[in-house]
Image (tube, rainbow, N blue to C red):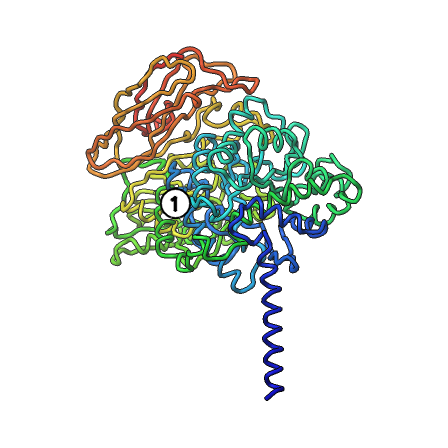
Amino acid sequence: MLKTLLVSVLMFTCHLVGAAQINHVKQQIWFNPGLSFETRAQALVNAMTIDEKITQLSHSTPAIPRLEVPQYNWWNEALHGIARNGKATIFPQAIGLGATFDPELAQEVANAISDEARAKYAIAQSIGNQGQYAGLTFWTPNVNIFRDPRWGRGQETYGEDPLLTSQMGTAFVKGLQGDDPKYLKSAGVAKHFAVHSGPESLRHQFDVEPSKKDLYETYLPAFEALVTQAKVAGVMCAYNGVYGQPSCASEFLLGEMLKKKWQFNGYVVSDCGALHDFHSGHKVTHNGVESAALALRAGVDLNCGFTYEKSLKAAFEEGLITQSLIDQRLKNLLMIRFRLGLFDPSELNPHNAIGQEVIHSPEHIELARKVAAKSIVLLKNEKQVLPLSKDIKVPYVTGPFAASSDMLMGNYYGISDSLVTVLEGIAGKVSLGSSLNYRAGALPFHSNINPLNWAPEVAKTADAVIAVVGISADMEGEEVDAIASADRGDRVAITLPQNQVDYVKQLAENKKGPLILVVAAGSPVDISELDPLADAILWIWYPGEQGGNAVADVIFGDTNPSGHLPLTFVKTIDDLPPFDDYAMTGRTYKFLKKLPLYPFGFGLSYTQFKFGKLSLSKRAPQEGENINISVEVENSTALDGETVVQVYLSPQVPLKNEAITNLKAFKRVHIGAYEKRLIEFTIEGKNLYRVNDAGENVWPSGAYTLAVGDSLPSKRSIELGAAPHGSQQIHF
């Protein structure tokens, strides 16, 4: 009895001691949720040894058991859904989202993604998965300007226009990070800072010296918007150099612009391996030790890669960096982890209430379908052959991507068991009595091996031929991923593979009914040979897991097409400057003087829209004054529709180095059958300034034209079927 009592007392005493030890750690100041994040982060920094601090400055951070700091991996992607981390909803690729011209929709998509992120993170933690792609810090979005169609990663962007990119990117970040006043739902990153859009083969060593005008007018606005308006948590510096310094060592970019001018208070992460490029590519340092020191001094808090891990300790021991500088960089990183609530009791963070039922939920799948449908651009609809009847007797679906699920995804994608190909979408839409026929007919990227091919002949019996052609992320993307690219992810030519062109020509020669061309690509493709052969053309980008259903929704009229091009489609690559020339002269809708195949902002509908006379609050605004604009938009048909109302400002007399026209505002609107709506805009005075050659904002001078319509104000837009614009002269 006495022995049992002694054992019980001993066990109780041990329990109290153990509990006291646990409580001692948990009562450390950095675990106290009643204190500010800054106080807690600083306390945790002070508690670490120099060796522990250095381990926390690379993307894969180990645990510190004595301080109960958990392991964390910063590297995660969410470009159009959680990527590379198992089951998740796959939304349309970013360029497709850009084609919606709908910031509210972008925020809705990002909110769905961050909901799934929170739920997946909780599950990953429960099974001890703390590895890469399992965290809450997403290196998204990509707000580089898609200045040249040859760039394979252009699909990751929202297009070629700084205003569109700024608004879409800002909305996306807000959706990712949530609106809780204390805790981030997830943490976004604006990348790649800055002046970064190919070539992929040169990205580790090339240096860019853009004009001050191009820099401030084109390359920086989206980053500034994400920092100052969206309050993005992080910024990723690029591989390339700018004005003679690697971006991740740039005093101008990281110091003067980001920290001083924009007052950025988040974290800076290097692109993966970018610090190694300091000595291997740019040759501004001799070794990893010097590279690590240079990056830390410049403002890089987190190294994606291994340069800090391998060399930062030596840099410290050699006196190239100070402990106070290490402390400063570490504190920036810890602040993000605290803002995510990773050191707080779960019940204090409202985002932790998000359950696993949101992961690939029916609501998110339906959202993916809606976004995909809104992203599809109708480029041609001769004699209104679309929409087709669901009771069509003999539809023929063909082409190398008609039954492709890879085409749906683009790059940086998750995994879904609900991938719907174009063939499957059409099969689910037409009458069960329809004699739907399918043959691939052509291989994606090279000629058929078998010289015999009956597929073109089938067109002779079909009431309509739906040919799905294009390219895929195998042909365009990042240098390490696009395995069908001979140019490390880029494209030297923007033509379709010749075998696809030849096959469409064969279909056109044999067709009985209309030929509907469905083109999948993340960038402009020259289809000038095929345009005259097709009765209708749909551009579908990389439309995500519900792409097939969305295409069928549009083809058969359940959805009225409403996407608009976020890019200029040139007729030939010869109309552009060299790929590695970063001057904006001759590029994008602003500076291209050659006639485009399809202009920026263009997109047809099954509905006919008319634009009335503009009403302006000021015809001669003084410096800094706002302009209020209103225009009546009429739907003259018996079909509800959506369009993107676009406002452009153009000098009436061309100015040296000045853009031909500038997008100043846009708004996606729904207009019912036979409805007239008054659409209103306010252009703030600060957005009316132009950028001069010195990079300074100056008030315009002289006569300008303010034009409002649903396309670029150009003769080419009207030739292709866009509605005439309403316009007014304005004098500055």
Amino acid on which disc 1 is placed: Glu
Q: Is residue 455 among the parts visible in the rendering? A: yes
Q: Which residue is mark 1?
A: 108
Furthest-front residue in view?
2
Secondary element at image label 1 = helix
Compared to residue 175, the image places residue 20 above or below, namely below
| 191 or 662: nearer the viewer | 191
Residue at 61% from the left image edge and 68% from the top image edge: 18
x, y percent for residue 717: 36, 27
Figure quadrant of residue 2: bottom right
x, y percent for residue 337: 55, 49
In which quadrant is the N terminus drawn? bottom right
x, y percent for residue 314: 77, 46
In the image, taking residue 95 as reference, residue 581 lies left or right, namely right
Compared to residue 428, the image places residue 328 above or below, namely above
Q: Is residue 404 among the parts visible in the rendering? A: no
